[in-house]
């Protein structure tokens, strides 16, 4: 039967030969594998080579102070988990023991040490080592599971974007009858709203995974936070009021300037309004208030509702991803990603988010606090809109390369209706062949293509004669900064994230027309 002690390696560091031999002999008789060092330099080398679970460390060494060596061992991520038993025959005062423990030692013994005391201490430290190793393994498993969850969410959102983009774009270009019946128009409105909700949910899933991995970027520019609040409230007013809610708005008449991503700030406010709508009933009130505090250089926006309120225990975890709140019979609490997304986006802007509720039946209030900016120029910068109106573009020869034939066909119908000449290709090699024969002015190229990926297609087109006049647009379900940088390096001029917004595509072609 294997002695359990043989599973452990102990490093015995002591420059006194007799003392080192005595301790090593006690440990070896107990079945431990022991390696020895007489200097701090040898100890550091053996930590890397022998990978001990426990170190017996003398305080007084010829080349380094033992307590400082302990600090070095514990500050190195590769050895921080190793147990350190500090031993000294010289530094024996209470202050010495406290200093040794403060430098990272797991315990501190005074020479001479009896064999039974030494073994009992070693056994205790190794039990602690095993428990901490189990904890480290558990933490590693949890981190891996969290990573897999984020990867799954990103992949799920990416896969959902393709069919959703086809449905959304097809719906946008589907012609309405000249004299639509009221019921038909109502059905179109219902379908349009549901497509919008599905698109928002997919975007939120992708955004929450990006934030957790630190992969989300902001387009920072001067933003009028008051104008953004007004526009977002106007966009949501019809939805909330159709559910019997009263929506009130109180914002300053003057601009409230913050530096950030206008689209992301509008997204944060809309998520708060959507959250308030879930937990209120007909007859309740939702109040949006923005306060400009120039003395503290901050703006505070609050969304207050008179709905069902929250218990204090849920308030403590309300911003955690996928936190589920039970709103009661007949209600649905959602996936629990909206408020977590708000917190992540606002913190990326240097702000804070807080929640408050007096308890069940007393409503809730979510508050956003953002730093404001005062511009030196007497004229404030013009506020940025989240989506600019596109001018009418010129007519181009356009090649769409996408292995999703439905998405490609939808784009072809839309672009042809705008007067463009459009050809399609469903593989990388086919796209290259058509580009050489058709000589398009604009190429919309998917990245994940069979046969040859979009990066390779772009590189080959850039190398061939005449292709430098083509405007290459990368199309992908992944929109991280590193994805866009890679596309730029391959030769793409622009980047569109699936599902392609037809308005954004029109805007891009209009900007190309102005070049």
Image (cartoon, helix red, strand yellow):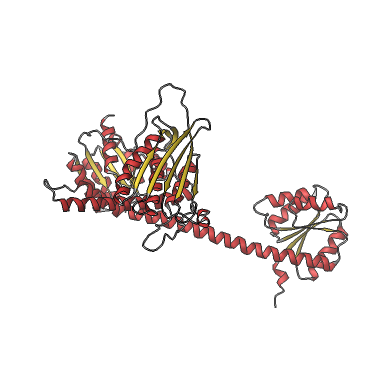
- Residue 59 appears in view: no
Number of dots carrying numbers: 0
Residue reaching furthest bottom?
Answer: 1
**Quarter of the image that includes the N terminus:** bottom right
- On screen, residue 38 versus residue 132, left or right, reads right
Q: Is residue 217 above or below residue 257?
A: below
- On screen, residue 386 versus residue 343, left or right, reads left
Q: Nearer the viewer, residue 404 or 34?
A: 404
**Quarter of the image that includes the C terminus:** top left
Q: Is residue 489 above or below residue 276?
A: above
Residue reaching furthest left?
Answer: 179
Q: Position of residue 513 (x, y in %)?
A: 25, 31
Q: Nearer the viewer, residue 319 or 307?
A: 307
Q: Residue at x 62, y 62 (%)?
A: 135
- On screen, residue 317 versus residue 440, left or right, reads right
Residue 47 placement: quadrant:
bottom right
- On screen, residue 306 versus residue 469, left or right, reads right
Q: Nearer the viewer, residue 257 or 414?
A: 257
Q: Position of residue 490 (x, y in %)?
A: 38, 41
- Residue 176 appears in view: yes
Q: Position of residue 8 (x, y in %)?
A: 71, 66
Q: Nearer the viewer, residue 276 or 122?
A: 276
Q: Residue at x 76, y 48 (%)?
A: 68
Q: Position of residue 213 (x, y in %)?
A: 48, 50
């Amino acid at each position: 039967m294997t002695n359990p002690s043989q599973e452990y390696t102990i490093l015995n560091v002591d420059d006194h030969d007799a003392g080192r031999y005595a301790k090593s002999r006690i440990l070896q008789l107990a079945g431990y594998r022991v390696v020895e060092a007489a200097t701090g330099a040898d100890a550091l080398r053996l930590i890397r080579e022998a990978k001990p679970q426990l170190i017996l460390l003398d305080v007084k060494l010829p080349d380094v102070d033992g307590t400082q060596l302990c600090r070095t061992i514990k500050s190195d991520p590769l050895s921080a988990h190793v147990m350190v038993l500090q031993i000294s025959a010289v530094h024996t005062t209470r202050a010495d023991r406290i200093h040794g423990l403060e430098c990272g030692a797991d315990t501190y013994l005074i020479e001479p040490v009896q064999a039974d005391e030494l073994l009992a201490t070693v056994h205790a430290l190794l039990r602690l080592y095993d428990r901490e190793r189990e904890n480290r393994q558990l933490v590693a498993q949890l981190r891996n599971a969290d990573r897999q969850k984020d990867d799954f969410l990103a992949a799920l959102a990416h896969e959902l974007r393709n069919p959703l983009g086809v449905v959304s774009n097809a719906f946008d270009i589907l012609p309405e009858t000249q004299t639509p019946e009221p019921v038909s128009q109502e059905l179109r409105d219902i379908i349009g709203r549901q497509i919008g909700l599905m698109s928002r949910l997919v975007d939120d899933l992708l955004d929450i995974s990006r934030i957790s991995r630190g992969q989300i970027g902001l387009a920072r520019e001067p933003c009028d936070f008051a104008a953004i609040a007004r526009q977002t409230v106007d966009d949501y007013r019809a939805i909330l009021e159709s559910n019997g809610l009263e929506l009130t708005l109180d914002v300053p008449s003057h601009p409230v300037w913050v530096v950030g991503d206008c689209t992301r700030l509008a997204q944060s406010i809309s998520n708060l309004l959507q959250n308030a709508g879930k937990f209120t009933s007909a007859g309740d009130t939702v109040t949006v208030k923005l306060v400009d505090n120039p003395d503290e250089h901050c703006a505070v926006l609050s969304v207050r509702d008179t709905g069902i309120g929250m218990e204090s225990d849920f308030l403590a975890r309300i911003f955690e991803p996928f936190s589920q709140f039970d709103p009661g019979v007949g209600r649905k609490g959602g996936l629990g990603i909206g408020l977590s997304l708000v917190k992540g986006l606002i913190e990326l802007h240097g702000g804070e988010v807080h929640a408050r509720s007096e308890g069940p039946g007393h409503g809730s209030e979510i508050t956003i606090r953002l730093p404001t900016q005062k511009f030196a120029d007497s004229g404030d910068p013009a506020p940025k809109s989240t989506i600019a109106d596109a001018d009418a573009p010129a007519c181009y020869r356009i090649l769409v390369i996408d292995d999703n034939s439905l998405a490609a066909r939808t784009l072809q119908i839309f672009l042809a209706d705008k007067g463009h000449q459009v050809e399609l290709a469903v593989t990388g090699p086919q796209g290259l062949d058509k580009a050489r024969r058709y000589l398009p002015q604009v190429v919309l190229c998917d990245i994940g293509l069979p046969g040859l990926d979009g990066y390779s297609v772009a590189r080959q087109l850039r190398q061939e004669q005449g292709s430098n006049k083509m405007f290459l647009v990368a199309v992908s379900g992944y929109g991280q900064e590193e994805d866009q940088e890679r596309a730029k390096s391959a030769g793409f001029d622009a980047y569109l994230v699936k599902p392609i917004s037809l308005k954004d595509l029109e805007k891009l072609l209009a900007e190309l027309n102005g070049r």
